[in-house]
Each structure stands twice: as structure tokens, then as C-alpha cells.
Amino acid sequence: MSDKADNQNITSIIEANTHYHKTFKQSELGTQPTRGLSILTCMDCRMDPYKFAGLQDGEAHIIRNAGGRATEDAIRSLIVSHKFLGTTDWCVIHHTGCGMTTVTDETIGQLLEQDLETAVLDGGTWVNPERVSSDNKKRGSDVGKTIKWYTFTDLEQSVLTDIKLIKDHPLVPSHINIYGCLLYTSDAADDSLRVD
């Protein structure tokens, strides 16, 4: 346990939290998002949903995963967001340059079966590099072949598919407004955010 406590990432998080706790002023905010909004988007570390959506603390729920996909868990979170916290506007936002478009479910399963360490993108193909040594003591597993990873190649279609999955879920009320947006992250795009 002590070697993990010495990790620089954890140390900086603890220090930041100490400062955040001392300066925390959002106690007066309720748990219900003031704009009645939930956003499902990608976990890409380059994007800040509060910034790209023009949001302030307390205005929306942000649900993030790889690709911003309508997985069972993401839909569970959306349902809780409405049932217990009153959101009625839900927005699915996918983005250009998403890493989930660079790999397939099949490839993920194969890579995990071979090795649990980080893969590398080599000439447009994800591969497990040769390893001299590793801190990991676990072998690869074929369990990854049984998981739906929600990879995709068509950005617009992925948003439409996710909207349909959410709308068709038996626990999603019919009056929820579900929107799909594409976030353009390259300079070449005309619009940074487009609603479909």
C-alpha cells in the first residue's frame, strides 16, 4: 500500500483536494442540475464538457465513457439522472478524432487475450509491443472477446444509434428530450458543435 501512496499522481490529487475542500463554495448548490440537463460524452482527456457546452457547476450531469456511447451503465446513469434528479434534456455528444474509431471490438479482444499492458498505435494499427519486462503479473485473457466495446467507424451513425438505444429503453420516459451532437475538434471544421 505504501508504494502506491508515494505515486505522484495520487499525491497531487490529495494536495489539490485539500485546497479544493478549503475553497469549496458550491455547498449551496442542490443535487438537481439547475438546467435539467444530462450530457453523455467521451472520456477524451482533451475535452472539457463544461467548457465546450458553456456550463457552470451545478447545471448538468456529465456522464463519460470511452466514445461517449450509450452503454448499459451510461443509460443507467441517465435513468437515475431523470428519476431522482429531474433531468429532462439529454444530449449525446460524440467527437471527431475519437480513439474508439481507430480500433474494433475484435481487435480489442485479441489484444487483451495476448497481453494486458498498454497497446501502441503502429502505422494505423493497434498492436502489443514486444516487452522485455512488465510490472503486471497477470496474463492476458479471452474475456475481452465477450465484451461489447462499442467501437465505431461512422461518427454520425454512432450518435443516431445511441439516441435510438436510449429512446427505446423501457425505463426511459417518452417525454425526455434526447439530442445528438457532433463535436468537431479539428481546426478544419466549419462548426465546432452541430446538433442533429
Image (cartoon, rainbow, N blue to C red):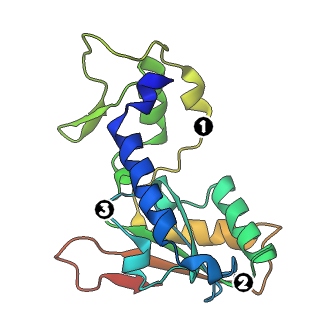
Which element carries disc 2, helix, strand or loop? Answer: loop
Dot 2 amino acid type:
Ile
Q: Is residue 44 left or right of residue 91?
A: left
Dot 3 amino acid type:
Arg
The numbered mark, 2 or 1, whose residue comes first in the sequence reads 1
In this view, the residue in front, 178 or 58, is 58
Q: Point out which mark residue 147 bears.
A: 1
Which element carries disc 1, helix, strand or loop? Answer: loop
Report how far apart the C-alphas of labels 2 and 1 lie in the structure: 29 Å
Report how far apart the C-alphas of labels 1 and 3 lie in the structure: 26 Å
How packed is label 1: few (under 14 Cα within 10 Å), some, or many (20 or more)? few
Q: Is residue 96 above or below residue 131?
A: below
The numbered mark, 1 or 3, whose residue comes first in the sequence reads 3
The percent position of residue 140, horizontal first and vertical second, equals 48, 18
Q: Nearer the viewer, mark 1 or mark 3?
A: 3
Observer able to see residue 29: no
Q: Is residue 117 above or below residue 182?
A: above
Label 2: which residue? 176
Label 3: which residue? 46
